[in-house]
Amino acid sequence: MRKRSLFALSAAVAILAALLTWTFVDDLGAHAARTVRVLAAYPHDPNAFTQGLVVYEGKLLESTGQYGYSSLRRVDIPTGRVERLLPLDAAYFGEGIAVLDDRVYQVTWQNGIGFVYDAKTLAAERTFRYTGEGWGLTTDGTHLILSDGSATLRFLDPQNLSAVKQLTVTDEQIPVVRINELEYVEGEIWANIWYSDRIARIAPTSGEVVGWIDLSALYPRSGRPDEAVLNGIAYDSEAERLFVTGKNWPQLFELEIEGL
């Protein structure tokens, strides 16, 4: 019965995705209107508690959470097939990932321990330590950028993982907290906000939110459990393709956003 329900939910979301286009007001300048269009919906493992998402060489790399279920995965985008899965020890709760210089960096929630893998083979190479919690992770091409659930982003030296600077994220001078999964998109830091259906677009020099992307129409809350929140942004800069998903979502969405 549960399998039939999941199939029906997946089919309904796929139909919605095929039709969905909407316009929202972006908090940038004179509140410009921007259009979001769903270009495609791909299968996504509904058991994946998505914590980190990146595109590398045309494949999706995904970090999943929950104790005893955390992993690092390589996923075929069109089919959603998991090509390789590396489970984490049950003591670790997987969180954000980033790829820099052909290495995958993965952080954990409260252990203060991260992992480094070869991005091509996903072979484990080493561990590293950091202070505080690990939530989201991305890179500007030079530093790793770490969120910890607060309004602070830390820029880390990828060689020794020490913090070289930090940034307080604000929207009209008010700190933005619960910053979660991160992605670097066309010179901006994009951030999921835990329990929000909006993505913050953050200026990496000032920490100011220059706009919000409203995705509340993508997968209505009435159709999903409370913990199945929007979380997972992946931008393929070479192909200029943007993907989003959420924790335990049955679909990965490819989006087109006006002005991107």
Image (tube, rainbow, N blue to C red):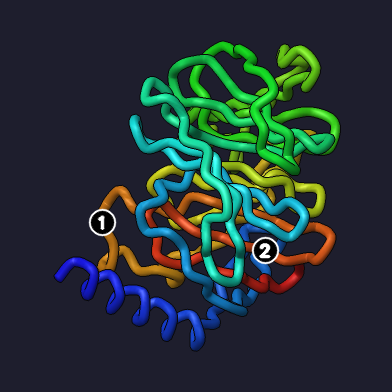
Q: Amino acid at mark 2?
A: Leu
Helix or strand or loop: what does disc 2 sit on?
Answer: strand
Q: Amino acid at mark 1?
A: Pro
User: Mark 1 Cα within 10 Å, few/some/many (few <14, many 20+)?
Assistant: few
Q: Is residue 69 left or right of residue 225?
A: right
Which residue appears at 63% of the width and 28% of the height?
146
Which residue appears at 42% of the width and 59% of the height?
45
Q: Earlier in the sequence, mark 2 or mark 1?
A: 1
Which residue appears at 73% of the width and 29% of the height?
144
Residue 180 is at least partly visible in this image: no
- Near-viewer residue (19 or 9): 9
Q: Residue furthest left?
A: 1
Read off the residue under disc 2: 242
Helix or strand or loop: what does disc 1 sit on?
Answer: loop
Query: Residue 237 at x, y = what percent?
Result: 80, 57
Q: Is residue 141 left or right of residue 98?
A: right
Query: Residue 198 at x, y = what percent?
Result: 50, 56
Question: What is the number of the mark on residue 225?
Answer: 1
Q: Is residue 245 above or below residue 53?
A: below
